[in-house]
Image: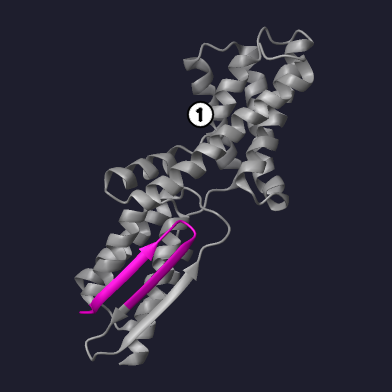
Amino acid sequence: MEEDLEHLLGFALRLGEEMIRCGANIERVSDTVYRVCESYHCRDVQFFALDCYLTLSLVGTDGGRASGQQCIRGGTSNHMEKLGRLNQLSRQICAQPPAPEELDALLDEAVSGTKSYSSGKTLLFTLFSAACLTGIYGGSLRDLSIILLNCVLAFFSVRYLRKLIFNRIIYNVVNAFLIGTVAIFFAQIGYLESSHTVMIVNSLKLIPGIPMVNSFRSLLSGNEINGTLELMKLLFETAAIAGGFLLSMLLLMGSVI
C-alpha cells in the first residue's frame, strides 16, 4: 500500500538522520537503511547520504514508488548509547518487521529512552580525562589547574558560544584563542613555566577524533566522495584550532616561540 510505503520511507530517513547525529559513519547508516527496506521486501532501493543530506527512493511489493529527502541541520555529536539503541532497533526490525505505521513510535521510544548524563557528570568526566592527559604529557600541578580552568571555559562555551557561532571553523578559532589567551596570561605572570603543555592538552579536547576516523573508514571502504568531503572539512576545523592558538601567541607574545 502507498501509505505503508510512505511510513517506511519517513522512518528510514529519520533513522538515518538520528544515526548520523549520534556520530555513525555513512557506510553504517547506508547498510542499516538498505537492510530495513529489504526486510519489507522493497525493490530498487536507492539511498545516498552525506553528513548534512539524505535522499532515499524505493519501490514497494505492489509496484508503488516513494522517494524523499532529508536535510540534517545543527551538526553532529558523539552519543554512543543512543547509537547503540538505534542499532538494536534496526536489528529488531530486520528480524521481525512490525507494521509500518508502528515504526515512528518505535523510533521515538528508542530516542527518548536514551539515558542522558547531567551537565555536572559530563563536566566531571571531561576534567578527569584532562587530568589523565596532563599526566601523560608530564604537566605540573600548576599546568593541571590552568588546563582544568580551560576545560570549564570550553565546556560552557559549547553551550553558549555555539548558539551564537554556528560555523564550526569560526567557533574553533574563537575557542582556541580564548584557551591560548588564558594559558599565555598565566605564563607571563609567572604562574606557569610554559604555556605549551596547557595548549597541547586542551587542543586534544577540541580535535574531532571520531569523525576523523569515520572519514578514513569511508575512504578505505571505497566511498571516496563522502570520505574526501568529510576529511577536508575536518582538516579545516583542525587547522582552525591551530590558527586560534597562533593568533593568541601573536597578539600576546608578539612572536611564536
Residue 53 vs 198, above or below: the answer is below
Judge left or right: residue 158 versus residue 132: right
What span is in magenta? 40-57
Judge left or right: residue 138 versus residue 228: right
Tell me which residue sits at (44%, 62%) in the image.
18
Give 221 or 202, whichever is nearer the viewer: 221
* Coordinates of residue 3 in the picture (x, y in percent): 37, 90
* Coordinates of residue 154 in the picture (x, y in percent): 65, 36
* Coordinates of residue 14 in the picture (x, y in percent): 43, 70
Magenta region includes residue 116: no
Q: Quadrant of residue 244?
A: top right
Tell me which residue sits at (73%, 12%) in the image.
187
Looking at the rendered image, the quarter that the N terminus falls into is bottom left
| Disc 1 secondary structure class | helix
Observer able to see residue 213: yes
Per the image, the residue denoted by label 1 is: 129
Looking at the rendered image, the quarter that the C terminus falls into is top right
